Image (cartoon, coloured by chain):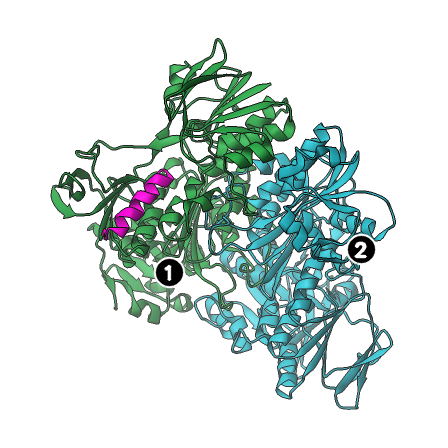
Chain colours: A green, B cyan
Amino acid sequence: MEIVVIGGGAAGLKAAARIRRLNDEAKLTVIEAGKYPSISRCGLPFYVGGMLQEPRNLLETTYGAVRDVNYFKKVKNIDVLTETKAIEINREKKLVKTVNKEGKEDEFSYDYLIVATGSKPVKPPIEGIDEDVEGIVHLHGVEDAERILDAWEEDAENAVIIGAGLIGMECAEALHNLDMNVTIVEIMDHILPTMLDEEIARMVENHIRAKGINLRLSSKVEKILNDGEKVTGVIINGEEVETDLVVVAAGVRPNVELAKKAGLEIGETGAIKVNEKMQTSDKNIYAGGDCVECIHLLTGKPVYTPMGSVANKQGRVIGDNICGIDSKFPGVLGTAIFQIFGMSIGRTGLCEREVDGAVVGCVAGADRFHFHPEHRPIRIKLIADKNGRLVGCQAAGLGVIDKRLDVAVSAIQMGAKAIDLTNFDLAYAPPFSTAIDLIIAAANMVDNKLRGLVESINAVNFARMLMSDEKFTVIDVRTEKEFKARSVKDERVINIPLSELRERVDEVPEEAILICQVGTRSYEAARFLTQKGKKVKVVDGGYAFFQPVLEHYGIEVGER
Amino acid sequence: MEIVVIGGGAAGLKAAARIRRLNDEAKLTVIEAGKYPSISRCGLPFYVGGMLQEPRNLLETTYGAVRDVNYFKKVKNIDVLTETKAIEINREKKLVKTVNKEGKEDEFSYDYLIVATGSKPVKPPIEGIDEDVEGIVHLHGVEDAERILDAWEEDAENAVIIGAGLIGMECAEALHNLDMNVTIVEIMDHILPTMLDEEIARMVENHIRAKGINLRLSSKVEKILNDGEKVTGVIINGEEVETDLVVVAAGVRPNVELAKKAGLEIGETGAIKVNEKMQTSDKNIYAGGDCVECIHLLTGKPVYTPMGSVANKQGRVIGDNICGIDSKFPGVLGTAIFQIFGMSIGRTGLCEREVDGAVVGCVAGADRFHFHPEHRPIRIKLIADKNGRLVGCQAAGLGVIDKRLDVAVSAIQMGAKAIDLTNFDLAYAPPFSTAIDLIIAAANMVDNKLRGLVESINAVNFARMLMSDEKFTVIDVRTEKEFKARSVKDERVINIPLSELRERVDEVPEEAILICQVGTRSYEAARFLTQKGKKVKVVDGGYAFFQPVLEHYGIEVGER
């Protein structure tokens, strides 16, 4: 059996290695356009940031072997041809035509072909982006990382990053660690616009601004300026800004030219369409990794979610099916996570805005027992549909959020409802969590809302109300001390501490909005007041979720 | 509606608070025998170890309010009577009789009664354990913690802990941090005997011994000696050992005297029997927390698993049902976790030995990308039944294991099979995990075994083989450098590095056992050799799982 793999990235090499383990007789050839096989692209921002000594580190196995061409031949009997480009797929004759760096053409016959051509950076239509000058980098390969480090060695002081997505974020920290002044320019109104709901995005924005990153939202780089040799500046919203380095981080798109030319079906996202077995429209051709689209497990619709973790899973499924093992890749939830200046931010599933009648649980608190010296604050937003089925989770904080996110992923992927999660027997001890872990507290809150025990208003909508002239009363149920130290300067906001609410219930109007620090006390107050016949709503997640949006909406806050 | 709660711990107070939020009219009385309501018992070892300034910290809410009697009255309108003992339940008249510390009797009528009487320490039948002398402590309440600190202030130098369970472990670190010489005495052959499989337990044993803890397994404290005033020593297996302090940590048992006397049904574990609604055999009496037994979600059998996290969930369910909300507590997986000297150890579900035809995936590796400076080693053992349904997980390491454990909990609780977990869209970025997270690698390994791709031998059974005179060949497929640096000194063990295996296949006998560092390379070698017609088995998890059991079985290891 002859198998040709186009692309020596995660999906292609994983498929090849799996096939080798299942079938030692198969002839395996991997065609890779770049210099290195098996580069871990997710490590590039860390290479730029100084965590790795050299790009070879990105090729190492955990036991220190370098996964180069010799390694693949000797250990796995896989022929990896680097700096060799596949230029044509002849489906009729089952042949792949290639050309190497010397220009020599060759062809390889296959019984099965695996297309794992990966992705390439999106190039936004900006004047000057194509100029052949130093200082314009698309962080996509090792060479790009090295160009950034070259610029740094030539004393680049200012950097502009185009796009506030995942790579843009990780890159911002890396460049900041190289002592550059970093400006991120994002065309949308908040960072990570497709990934996060607004209030979560604002938490990140405030955090990175406090660390010295310039963030320009709803803004556009209109032109990249150069002096004929190097970048000298950019024009942002008509204004010239000096810069030595422009990093384009506007996302990636699938490399599908070869597949298209061969007549393979391309999906509506622009990536190669595959079935659950990772088969393309040609049953002898499989595809996986950054060049294919996936099915979203919740919507059933195709999505483009290029991720190293997904590519590895798909590679395994491809290997199985080619070797006669029935194996399926069911789809994705669009899970993503990153860390910036010590804050972790992650998401999975759908955003609140994507879900009709979404029921959310916003909670904030410590990631472990609050007397444990290592406890750190985290915020979780758990999203269910109107039937209680969990459909999304977003989290941010200086503490441990990845655990809670992965619990949500596991629950969502298995079709759990909020009520199921409330009784998950999660691991509890003071160094790891609170007795009621915050993800369970979030599920409890969703459950409370589904049972109609409390009504709520989202932090962003609350901010918009405060900016209007509408008449309403907000009761801040925190302690007097907390209220006086820092609260919204607005006469519609009054303070009745939870501990005095029973005595002062007469001061509460017929309708009110309740707020506290993290939502616990306002929920308790809401239950009490509802039973006293008042019509109340709580601000989801209290100040912990409202605080981050204040500044953006120009709401005045301070001592009272 | 009148509701009486016996016991002001997690379950009782959670139920009371939930009822108050659902029904502001209910009259709520909590009867607590101790000095403080709502003490967080899980924090006691940390109080002993110096993490908390004073026991009051254990009563604090996250916003610094002290949850004392006044707090409950003022904020929640709950009457908490401390230092008051419930002495009789009259089910016919629906009355609870109490006596306070002045000896004054009283009675409270109820519509619903909640029994949350908690647990008490198991007192093993040891001569001298009941003597009224200083230096014998059952770490169960704040007073006990204070007695340990008193002993410390009086320069206690040596401490003996009876029982190597969860509390014994946490206590060992706390006493070690107080500069005491700590000896743990465990009657069984390995620590945490009911919680962990042997090879995982051995990882912990080696770790704590290296930190200076004396561990005496298969040993018994036969007598506690005293000079009439204080403890002076113990007799362990006939040998006298000097000690100033004896901490009895032989587990806890449910406080059921009151329930028994009232004729409530007691389950086979000795704890109160309840249904899914947490109702006892009397429909007006609910029970929850450390005094009840739970249903094990996998076996369907009753188990006794006293845990703060479980008590909180049950309290909520009790509150719901009393207030007319249909709510169920489905059961537990017996999840547990602890940390000792920087190592985290956890488990959920069943042990390998409890599962007929168990299929396990043992993996070891970094908890995040191996080029990330914060990566730390972890080891995971994932257990499925013969149909592939996940039934257990155990993990230990200096890195992050709680996340992987909670993913396993979520998967098991939702009825996932190993194949489901292989495709979980878990959050991936270098600071949080590897592209193929180790829990997914473990699921992949289970899947490989279920498909018959590889056969394995457990590290403990392998150790036993090496101690026998049996003839067999073990091929260590690590590099020559690794092999020479440290391997088993046994002529039956030879070295053929994976990279040379293809050329040296003729040196491999018809049958062999394969070992490497973490299992990856021996799996790859096994697949190759199987296809060459050899009958091979891999050692589950390689040296990472075998190393910890070496010493116990007296297997010689070193340079070769």
Q: Chain of mark 1?
A: A
Q: Quadrant of residue B298?
A: top right
Residue interval drawn in magenta:
A140-156
Image: B193 above or below B502: below
Residue closest to the eye, B216 or A451? B216
Residue closest to the eye, A376 or B518? B518
Residue closest to the eye, A7 or A491? A7
Q: Chain of mark 2?
A: B
Image: A222 above or below B90: above
x and y, in percent, of residue A288 in the image: 48, 27
Residue under numbered circle 1: A516
Q: Residue at x 29, y 66 (%)?
A: A486
Quadrant in the picture for the N terminus of chain A: top right
Q: Can residue A41 be seen in this snapshot?
A: yes
In the image: residue A490, left or right of residue B317: left
Q: Main secondary structure of the magenta part?
A: helix
Q: Residue at x 56, y 32 (%)?
A: A73
x and y, in percent, of residue B535 in the image: 77, 33
Three-letter amino acid code of the residue under disc 2: Glu
Evaluate if marks 2 and 1 touch, with contact meaning CB atoms under 8 Å apart.
no
SS assignment at label 1: loop
Residue under numbered circle 2: B268
Quadrant in the picture for the C terminus of chain A: bottom left
x and y, in percent, of residue B554 in the image: 79, 60
Structural crowding at the residue carrying mark 2, measured as other residues with C-alpha within 10 Å and reported as few (<14), some (14–19) or many (≥20): few
Q: Residue at x 46, y 67 (%)?
A: B75
